[in-house]
Image (cartoon, rainbow, N blue to C red):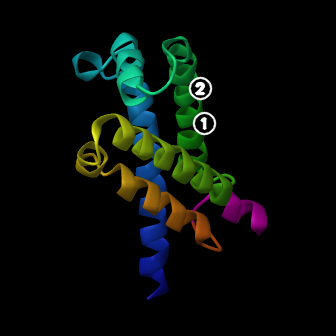
Amino acid sequence: MFIYQDLASLLLRLSLGAGFLSAVASRLGLWGKHSSGWTNFVNYTGQVNSFMPASMIPTLAVVATALEMLLGILLLTGFKTGYAALAAAILSLLFAIAMSISAGVKDPLDYSVFAFSAGAFLLSTLPAHKWSIDQLIAQ
């Protein structure tokens, strides 16, 4: 039974990390014609955070992107997994709340942002992370 838990933990960690890095890649144009681009992302950041002053939006977009890149790398490699997962959970929960305030609860539900956050919270509670840098360091 434990192998299923280990595999589920690995897949959760990798999917969360890849989700963050894919979003960053899209903003930076790395997905080619499928990319959203930086300007579109900054505009979307303004829509999601409509309650924030417009002058704060570019900074918020940069900070969110930097955090998502860092958390994506930490999760993919399995380094400081518990902390990275907790930070990912909080960041995505804040995103879901902002989406809910600005556009209603339908959008974060449709895009599974609450589920993403819950998965990250769950990952942060696990005592060990197989197939990770954390496991290598613990040996």
Residue positioned 42% across, 61% down in the render: 11
The residue that mark 2 highlights is 63
Report the mark closest to the observer, 1 or 2: 2
In the rendered structure, the answer to whether residue 11 lies left or right of residue 139 reads: left
Q: Quadrant of the C terminus?
A: bottom right
Is 5 placed above or below 80 here?
Answer: below
The mark tally for this picture is 2
Q: Which numbered circle lies on residue 70?
A: 1
Q: Where does residue 127 sit, x and y in percent of width and height? A: 65, 74
Residue positioned 68% across, 65% down in the render: 135
Q: Secondary structure at mark 2?
A: helix
Question: Residue 33's quadrant in the figure?
Answer: top left
Residue positioned 61% across, 45% down in the render: 74
Q: Main secondary structure of the magenta part?
A: helix
Alpha-carbon neighbours of circle 2 within 10 Å: few (<14), some, or many (≥20)? Answer: few
Residue 129 can be seen in this image: no
Question: Residue 133's quadrant in the figure?
Answer: bottom right
Q: Quadrant of the N terminus?
A: bottom left
Is 57 placed above or below 92 here?
Answer: above
Question: Residue 69's quadrant in the figure?
Answer: top right
Dot 2 amino acid type? Val
28 in magenta:
no
Q: Which numbered circle lies on residue 44?
A: none
Residue 38 can be seen in this image: yes
Q: Where does residue 28 sit, x and y in percent of width and height? A: 42, 17
Relative depth, front residue between 7 and 103? 103
What is the CA distance from the residue labelled 1 to the residue labelled 2? 11 Å
Dot 1 amino acid type? Leu
Dot placed on the residue nearer the N-terminal end, 1 or 2: 2
Alpha-carbon neighbours of circle 1 within 10 Å: few (<14), some, or many (≥20)? Answer: some
Region rendered in magenta? 131-139
